[in-house]
Amino acid sequence: MSSQELDLRDYFRIVQKRLWLIVSIVVVMCAIAGVYSLYIKKPVYEASTKIIVNQTPTQSTVAQLDLNQINTNIQLINTYKEIIKTPAILDVVTKEYPQFNVTTEELMKKVNVSSVNNTQVMTLVVRDNSYSRAAEIVNAISLVFKQEIPSLFNVQNVSILNEAKVNPPIAPGPVEPNVVLNMAIAFIVSLMIGLGISFLLEYMDDTLKTEADIEQYLGLPTLAMITRVGQDEFTKGAGAETQALPSRRAGELENVTAAK
């Protein structure tokens, strides 16, 4: 038990000894993360629409609820999610909306489609450095999907539940960068790096510093120690000895006797 307590004290001693190094690393890395998040990283905005896809009225009766048909529609949602991100839809978007000035590959990187479990509703999300541009793109993709899906599947009942507002009354804030999250990550990572460097430096330092080190590694007791005297203490001590000596002036006859 005592050895474990001693090891724990050693850890605290190492941290206390290298505290300036750890704090410096944490401050520098947090400052870099803050500057990058606020001034270098471009803000990213997010706009979304919701789409619901059902079978055509001729394929299901309106008066009777067909649970099997609903389950089939829910299972087809995964297929629709993949279709939206294919060139079959995005190629049409790039051709019909040349003002976006983006390629199909660039649109694929901007688009994300998700759905809530056991629902027929899909959420289409587009991220861009401009919110209005993201809203225009996500609305365009939704409209093209509504136009093109009947030719790909035997589905006619596609509804856009809500469109993204291009010019909302209150401008939404960016979703990236997350300054607080980046600072927290930088703090944790820099703290781990600082502790790792401190323990590494201590491990590589094989000098003997205390009486306990001498007794532990050499097995010899300490008889005497010579402490290191700083330059200021040395100068101060020399000045005190000089002032303690009595001053003498030339010509003074004190302590002088004449021979007879």
Image (spheres, rainbow, N blue to C red):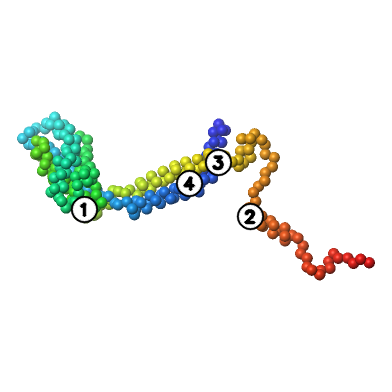
What residue is shown at x 19% (from left), y 45% (from top)? 104
The foreground one among 222 and 166 is 222
Q: Is residue 247 above or below residue 73?
A: below
- Marked residue nearer the N-terminal end (3 or 2): 3
From the viewer's perspective, is the residue at label 1 or at label 3 nearer? 3
Q: Give x and y (percent) for residue 30.
A: 41, 49
Residue at label 3? 205
Q: Quadrant of the N terminus?
A: top right
Query: Residue 72's image quarter?
Result: top left
From the viewer's perspective, is the residue at label 3 or at label 4 nearer? 3
Task: Tell me the distance, in whole angstroms, between the alpha carbons under discs 4 and 1.
Answer: 44 Å
Q: Spot the residue most to the left.
A: 58
Say which amino acid is labelled 2: Gln
> Badge 3: few (under 14), some or many (20 or more) residues near its Cα, within 10 Å?
few
Point out which mark residue 132 bears. Answer: 1
From the viewer's perspective, is the residue at label 2 or at label 4 nearer? 2
Per the image, label 4 sits on a secondary structure element best described as helix
From the viewer's perspective, is the residue at label 1 or at label 2 nearer? 2
The foreground one among 243 and 68 is 243
Tell me: 257 left or right of 101: right
- Marked residue nearer the N-terminal end (3 or 4): 4
Residue at label 2? 231
What residue is shown at x 44% (from left), y 43% (from top)? 193
Q: Quadrant of the C terminus?
A: bottom right
